[in-house]
Amino acid sequence: MARETGELVDWNDDRGYGFALSDRGERYFVHIKSIDRMATRPRVGDRLSFTLGVGRDGRPAAVNVKILGANPLPSRAARQRGNPAPARQRAFGWRLATAGALVALLLVALLLGHAPLWLGLAYLIMGIISACLYAADKRYAETGQWRISEAMLLGTDLCFGIVGGLLAQQVFRHKTAKQSYIGSTMLLCLLHILWLGGLAGGWIEPAAVTDLASDFLR
């Protein structure tokens, strides 16, 4: 089948789909799974080469899409030879470092008796829930399904799920491109660092934590 060329005129990176306008003036649905893997994410204005296929709704869609001028991801063999990872992947290290720091502060607070045991369990349980939510949202984005709201993801991270959320962002490479979401995540990290640091240093009394929880549950 003959290939067509066009331009990516609409793209929702969180949901993983958008629309291409062919040089003939026709508009076609584009899903992330139909695009050859590239070192950079698709962006509005990218020139595309594609063939026509049928989308889930039976309408014409762009498939076998290539982003013209984009560099393909290095092969597995090249990565194993020690080629450096893309800069975007290297930038993810702060999430692991922050998660480790939060766990360390929590352990210090627990070992010194500055925090109740239930707080540690809350971080563990909510961290697992948060990681599961990120994994599900990543899967929904790749399959074009209804997404989990950012408010729910951030709210879970706020309510003791931050460590699991950071680890899930790292592992699934999810919610790592949108600058506003990165900023919100960093703010939550700062709040948890101040909170756990205050407990570990003894500046926040354990009784205050219990009282806060009691007030919340009323």
Image (spheres, grey):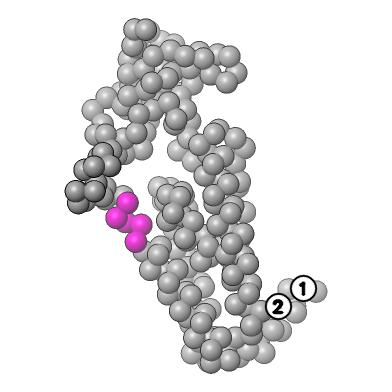
Quadrant holding the N terminus: top left
Circles 2 and 1: CB distance less than 8 Å? yes
**Gap in Å between the C-alphas at discs 2 and 1?**
6 Å
Residue located at (51% from left, 14% from top): 54
- The image quadrant that residue 145 belongs to is top right
Q: Height in image: 189 above or below 74?
A: below
Quick check: 3 left or right of 160?
left
Residue located at (48% from left, 30% from top): 17
* Amino acid type for the residue under numbered disc 1: Leu
Q: Is residue 149 magenta?
A: no
* Amino acid type for the residue under numbered disc 2: Ala
The x, y position of residue 123, in whole percent, is 59, 71
Q: Height in image: 161 above or below 151?
A: below
Q: Residues within 10 Å of mark 2 (few under 14, many from 20)?
A: few
Residue linked to disc 2:
213
Residues shaded magenta: 89-93
Q: Is residue 91 magenta?
A: yes
Residue located at (56% from left, 45% from top): 137
The x, y position of residue 46, in whole percent, is 32, 27
Identify the disc placed on residue 217.
1
